[in-house]
Amino acid sequence: MRRTFTLQPPNPAVTSTGLSPAGDLLPEEFDHLMGDQVVTRKDLAFTHSMFVQCFLPIRALPAHNNQHWHVTHGSASIAIEAGRLADPRIPGNWEAQEVPTGPKARLLFAYINDFAIRRNTPVIDLARSLRSFMETNQVPIGGPNGHELTKQLKNIAAAHILFGSWGDDRVRTRAARVASGIDFWIDHDPKQSTLWEPEMQLAPEYFEALREHRVPLYFPALVKLQSNPRAMDVFCWLVYRMRSVRFAVKIRYAALHPVFGRTIKLLKHFKIEFRKALIAAHRFYPEARVEPQSDYLILYPSRPLIPADAPNRRL
């Protein structure tokens, strides 16, 4: 008997630009049963559709190679270049940042993108609203966690991103710096070693791209998976991809390797890590029907975690 279990794949119903249309992916208000859980509107966060197809590094990159990163998934690709920020502690000094990496960068991107979309503003409050957001989702913002959030926030603020897509009749490149500006309000309390009163102004081109290509995420799952960033990525990919599966789709591990395992050299080792991540992600989307084989996955039509026909009302 054929055994299937629930998880998700990449997207066949992609436009010629490599991006899915955003309009039908923006439910405003609904309840959707997911096993014994209920997905509600307040659980959703929004992000750019590229970030559910191409992903950040799993962990910090080596010091000699932490300024550049690129990932290609089908006809979509992103390239990220690290930038510099004015050093809040040393006047006149420019501080080199790194490519955003790890689970905290993923959570921060989700927060920043969601804040911009939900409030229709390029000015992102990274003080009270961010604290409230993280505390509501039980993500500690003090101690080592606070240090890592601050580090990744600065990495995101300085990052330059290229979005690339290949269609039948044209190739597109879109350049965007995430932030056109960021202000840090310096905390002079010697007991505090983090800068945690910033405000970010999104660059106009990034803000417009975000509004045009936004898709929803189920944020509680990302929080619970943050100890396993590869599972975070697999979960986002599944939720996005399964919307378009209308018949059985076969996806080879060799095609998934450069997307989810760029830093894993051998395909046989990637298969092991990917399947671990798939099992972890599947806990939060148990209705996804996925059948792992030795060299590929088969995706079967499944009930979407976030219904595609949910009402699309003003945010």
Image: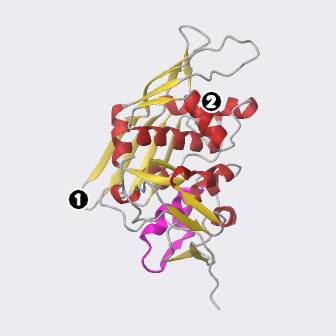
Task: Find out whether residue 248 is within the magenta segment.
Answer: yes
Image spot of residue 219 (x, y percent): 58, 51
Q: Which mark is residue 158?
A: none
Q: Secondary structure at mark 2?
A: helix
Q: Residue at x 32, y 45 (%)?
A: 173
Applied colour scheme = secondary structure
Quadrant for the N terminus in the image: bottom right
Which amino acid type is marked by label 1? Answer: Asp
Would you place residue 171 above or below residue 181 in this image? below
* Residue 164 at least partly seen: yes
**Dividing the picture into quarters, in which one does residue 95 lie?**
top right
Identify residue for label 1.
169
Query: Which residues lie in the magenta part?
Result: 236-261
Residue drawn at x 34%, y 32% is 204
Whether residue 47 is situated above or below residue 243 in the rendered picture? above
Q: In the image, residue 92 lies at what x, y percent?
A: 53, 8
Is residue 58 magenta-colored? no
**Label 1 to label 2: alpha-carbon separation:** 41 Å
Pick out the residue farthest to the top: 91
User: Is label 1 in a helix, a strand or a loop?
Assistant: loop
The answer to which of 134 and 204 lies nearer the viewer is 134
Q: Does 8 appear above or below 209? A: below
Residue 261, image x and y in percent? 60, 56
- Inspect the image, locate mark 2, and give the three-letter code of the amino acid beneath it: Lys
Please give the label number shown on residue 151: 2
Tell me the chief SS of the magenta region.
helix
Numbered circles on residues, count: 2
